[in-house]
Image (spheres, rainbow, N blue to C red):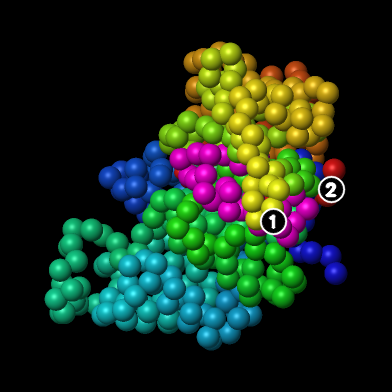
Amino acid sequence: MTSPIHVTSEIGKLKTVLLKRPGREIENFTPEMMPRLLFDDIPYLPIAQKEHDYFADTLRDNGIEVLYLEKLAAEALDAGGDKVRDDFLEQMLTESGYATGTIHDALKDYLGSMNNQDMVNKIMEGIRKNEVDFVPTDLVSAAETEDYQFYMDPMPNLYFTRDPSACIGEGLSINHMTYPARQRESLFNEIVIKYHPRFANKGIHVWRDRNHDTRIEGGDELVLNDHVMAIGVSQRTSADAIQDIAKNLFKDGHFDTVIAIKIPHNHAMMHLDTVFTMINYDQFTVHPGILGEGGHIDTWTITPGKNEGELHLEHRTDLKAVLKDALKLDDLDLIPTGGGDPIIAGREQWNDGSNTLAIAPGVVVTYNRNYVSNDLLRKHGLKVLEVISSELSRGRGGPRCMSCPIVREDI
Ligand SMILES: NC(=[NH2+])NCCC[C@H](N)C(=O)O
């Protein structure tokens, strides 16, 4: 039986990818909510959808099957039946702050009256107080702050499907994410893997599930080849989580090396893939801003230790040398975002100029607005497919963030 998930590199010909078409959730908030929701602006929904459809069409035109999270989630609930739907709803309400109580009951009635697709869409876009038929009379619900508009917050970051889960080999990680704004997202991935007919009971290995306190996000998880991963030590991914997943990958998978790369902990560079991506057998994009004096950066090469369950860590600071050794290459082409010019690099990195999605070795999808980086990629021999990006980029993520590869051909 071939596994429904198969990802043994960042660059192998992409066959199947998971996207989320931006919906009402990306505009269902006010400027005051932006920092907490990890957005820098409020996108204009019709244009964001147009841009996203253009992105999806670009992938389809290149022979890639596009799946949508919102559709898979509803189909998973359809297949799971009443008990699965009820458990999912309870879990979602609990994680939204309503484990019990009259608001819980009112929200459950409200969502419970919908079909699965409407319910999924509604949870994603958020629930305003004024849309639920409910007058609080008990002390706890009456004490809820009146001026806050939402019972359940929107989840505008869902179109960054890269982050709540990551496919690795024939398995995946279903992630406990860092900020409350995104923590509920991976519940959708969990039900898809457990109950969607395409994935359920197919022997998919979950390298690490969402029931953890330590945090990891897919934007930090890069599959370099069938035995080497790079994982960012970042604002979103902790060292503990990296060591935990490394142990599981070494124990039950075909992986023997995890390179942990420490990047600055800030919003513009929240994940490794905002500053570093693999785009060909021996080519990478690198944002010059992550390299310190002399081009150095902290890395730890993690390999299995002497005894079962132990890890061996080697600290090194020459990224190029570390990658060359791990990938057994004589040379490497590290292509600097914005050509290395500090103003252009800063500007283009902010709009995800380093966040390229490879759909085959040497073929990448990028945002058209990063024209300096795009030209440079072409000069380095890459085929660059540009997609439109005025509204999508306001969420601080590019083509790699907006896509979760499910199946790639081996390299
Ligand atoms: N893989 C990525 N770089 N994803 C970008 C996620 C952006 C999103 N606004 C966040 O802060 O979480």
Task: In this rendered view, identify the residue nearer to me: 293 or 218.
Answer: 293
In percent of width and height, residue 226 lies at 79, 47
Mark 1 = which residue? 308
Would residue 106 be seen by someone viewing this image from the given angle? no
Q: What range is drawn magenta here?
A: 230-255
Q: How far apart are labels 1 and 2 at the CA level?
A: 29 Å
- Bin the neighbour count of mark 2 within 10 Å (Cα to Cα): few under 14, some 14-19, many 20 and up: some
Within 10 Å of disc 1 (Cα), the crowding (few <14, some 14-19, many 20+) is few
Is the residue under label 2 in contact with that under label 1 (CB below 8 Å)?
A: no
Coordinates of residue 9 in the picture (x, y in percent):
76, 44
Q: Position of residue 191 (x, y in %)?
A: 58, 70
- Please tell me which residue is depicted at 44% across the width and 50% down the height of the picture: 178
x 76%, y 28%: residue: 324
Q: Is residue 71 magenta?
A: no
44 in relation to 339, above or below = below
Instruction: Give above or below for 406 relative to 128.
Output: above
- Circle 2 — which element? loop
Quarter of the C terminus within the rendering: top right
The label number, if any, that marks residue 410 in the structure image: 2
